[in-house]
Image: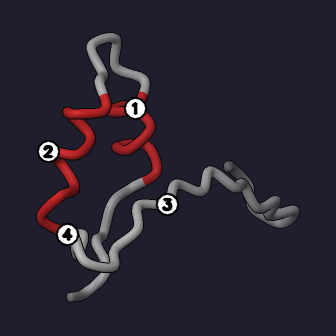
């Protein structure tokens, strides 16, 4: 299975939606996770880019 291409903003909007429930998240990602040995991990780490004009 290949990694999923998702933007940080798309995930953030989904998680911040007012009607968000855990079951909704599972419905969105369950097809990408192996139920035998899969994990769902969220990492909201921001890496500073001192030479970027806009972050």
| The one of 51 and 43 positioned closer to us in this rendering | 43
User: Tag 4 or tag 3, which sits nearer the N-term?
Assistant: 4
Q: CA distance from mark 4 to mark 2?
A: 10 Å
Numbered mark located on residue 41 in the image:
3
User: Tag 2 or tag 1, which sits nearer the N-term?
Assistant: 1
Which residue appears farthest toward the right when viewing the image?
50
Residue 10 position by quadrant: top left
User: Tag 4 or tag 1, which sits nearer the N-term?
Assistant: 1
Q: Residue at x 80, y 64 (%)?
A: 49
Numbered mark located on residue 27 in the image:
2
| The one of 45 and 24 positioned closer to us in this rendering | 24
Q: Residue at x 38, y 44 (%)?
A: 11
Q: CA distance from mark 2 to mark 3?
A: 15 Å
Query: Which residue is identified by label 4?
Result: 32
Query: Which residue is identified by label 1?
Result: 15
Seen in the picture, residue 35 relative to 13 is either above or below; the reply is: below
Residue 51 position by quadrant: bottom right
Seen in the picture, residue 24 relative to 42 is either above or below; the reply is: above
Numbered mark located on residue 36 in the image:
none
Residue 37 left/right relative to 55: left
Q: Residue at x 20, y 33 (%)?
A: 24
Residue 32 left/right relative to 18: left
Q: CA distance from mark 1 to mark 2?
A: 13 Å
Indicate which label's residue lies in the foreground, 1 or 4.
4
Seen in the picture, residue 29 relative to 1 is either above or below; the reply is: above
Q: CA distance from mark 1 to mark 4?
A: 18 Å
Across and down, in percent, residue 13 comes to 38, 31
User: Tag 3 or tag 2, which sits nearer the N-term?
Assistant: 2
User: Mark 1 and 4 residues: CB-CB less than 8 Å, in contact?
Assistant: no
Residue 36 position by quadrant: bottom left
Residue 37 left/right relative to 29: right
């Amino acid at each position: 299975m290949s990694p999923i291409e998702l933007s940080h903003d798309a995930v953030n909007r989904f998680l911040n939606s007012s009607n968000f429930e855990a079951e909704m998240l599972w419905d969105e990602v369950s097809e990408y996770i192996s139920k035998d040995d899969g994990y769902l991990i969220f990492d909201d780490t921001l890496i500073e880019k001192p030479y970027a004009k806009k972050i």
